[in-house]
Structures are given as C-alpha cells and as structure tokens.
Image (cartoon, grey):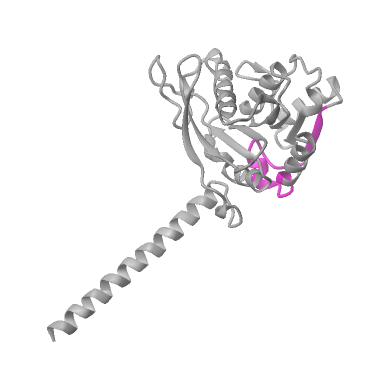
Amino acid sequence: MAKKLVFMIVVVVLLALSAGKIFSLLKNRISSVKNGETPQTMQATQAERVVMQTDDGVDIIGDWYPVEGGKQAGILLHAMPEDRKSFVGLAHALNKQGLSALAIDLRGHGESVNSLKGKLDYRKFSDNDHQQSIFDVQSARKFLEGKGFAKDAQFLIGASVGANLAMKYAAENKAVKAVIALSPGINYRGIETETLPYEDVASKIFLIAAQDDAYSAQTIQELQKKNESFTVKLYTSGGHGTDLLKNQSDLTTFILNFLKDKLI
C-alpha cells in the first residue's frame, strides 16, 4: 500500500512539472509574439545582449543578431518611447536574408540609462540631450567595425526619431550603404532632416510613412520635392514608426528588396 501511494505521488509530481513546462513555453511564445515575432521568426538565432560606451560616457545596451559568414550588418534605431525590442521581428527577417543586425536602446531608453553623469531618463531630456543620441549611433558603428563590418558594409533602419538619426548619420557618413526611414519628421526634438547634405546619399534612402500619420507623410513628400533620388513608399494607413511593420504585411518585403538592391 505504501509503495502504491509513493508511486501515485511521483506520478502527480511529474504531471505537475510537465504542466508547468508547457505553461512556460506557451507564455514565452505569447511574449515573443507581442514583441513582434511570428511563429516563422521564433526559430531564428537568439540575440546576444551587448554593451557599448559612447564617446561622451553613456553605456548603450544592444541586442546583437549575428549571421555566420554574413557580409553586411544593420543598426536598428527605435522610436521614442520604445526600445530595441520593437525591432525583434525585423531583425529576424534580416537574419533570414543573411544580414546581421544590431538593435540598440538609445540613451535614456530601455536599459541605456547609465552614464558618467548619472542616470538618464528620456522623459527629462532637453532637445540638446536628444541630439546627443548621434553618439549612440557612432558607438554602434564602432561595434560593427569591431565585428569586421566596415562603414561600407553597414546600413541603418530607424523609426520616428530613430529615422531622423539614421538620416543624419548617413548624410555625414556617406560610405553607409542604405537607410530605411520609418516615419521620419522634418524636426524631431531638434534632429532635423530637411537641411541635411544629401548629395550622393539620397539614392540610398528609403522613406516610408502612412497618410494617417500626417506629419511624417508631409515630411517625406517635402523631402522628395527637394530631391527626387529618394525612394518613397506612402501608405494610406498604418500608423507611426514600427507600427507600419505590424499593420502593412508587405512592408518587410519592400525593405528587404531595397536592401538587396543597395547592398550589392
């Protein structure tokens, strides 16, 4: 009788452990989908958490999505108030095309809150503080160079203020191969796009917005008037920044095709 009771207890414990494991897997699956992954991308290589330091002493936290043998790599710059996790799905899509990716938390966002001057919080930033985020992009560029990707093997993808930063960086570093700008603005917190020196760069830039995001839609139309070399995609709807990726199912394909053309 005692042996039978012990056996039953063991069976119950094993069943409980199995149920717990299944629940954990389901929870992780749901969490991944919320972060922008799909069942197809969840089999992709997991990101490595990395730390970089800017020239002005800010610790920048990133997710590094490497592709073994890959020849190009991208820097992914999120919108405010988002963080690097908003690019999980796109990073995996890039991986599947043989492209490595580095998604970073811009200063004051996500985990990038430590600096020589103390804790950072984007909600307390002045326009000048936001403009210093260009140092974050530079630290990402140096990280990729350390991984063997020269400037002319790098591209940038940015959303909202991240799009403006990507465009500014490319205009000042013309060796960059391509830029994807999701919902850029003429001026986000002092980071301007209208007056940048686009000579030899505009043809490398893909501007994307939706008409239900009036400011960004107007921005890309104004920029195209000034330089017809931009590639432009204007949706009727789709929202702002990385929401475009969620709401327009064909956008990731357009982005991948543009990169394929520019990274040759």
Q: Residue at x 51, y 47 (%)?
A: 46
Q: Residue at x 67, y 24 (%)?
A: 151
Residue 216 location in percent, x, y? Answer: 71, 29
User: Would residue 86 appear left or right of 196 to someone viewing this image?
Assistant: left
Span highlighted in magenta in the image: 230-252
In the rendered image, the vertical position of residue 249 relative to residue 11, given as above or below: above
Q: Residue at x 52, y 27 (%)?
A: 106
Q: Quadrant of the N terminus?
A: bottom left
234 magenta-colored: yes
Total number of numbered labels? 0
Q: 51 or 132, which is in the foreground?
A: 51
Q: 189 or 3, which is in the foreground?
A: 3
Q: Is residue 195 visible?
A: yes
Q: Quadrant of residue 22?
A: bottom left
Q: Residue at x 46, y 20 (%)?
A: 58
Q: Is residue 235 visible?
A: no
Q: Quadrant of residue 75?
A: top right
In the rendered image, the vertical position of residue 15 relative to residue 182, given as above or below: below
Q: Quadrant of the C terminus?
A: top right
User: Would residue 71 appear left or right of 124 to someone viewing this image?
Assistant: right
In the rendered image, the vertical position of residue 216 relative to residue 119, given as above or below: below
Residue 153 location in percent, x, y? Answer: 69, 30
Q: 81 or 204, which is in the foreground?
A: 204
Q: Residue furthest left?
A: 2
User: Would residue 112 appear left or right of 42 to someone viewing this image?
Assistant: left
Residue 224 location in percent, x, y? Answer: 83, 25
33 magenta-colored: no
Q: Residue furthest bottom?
A: 1
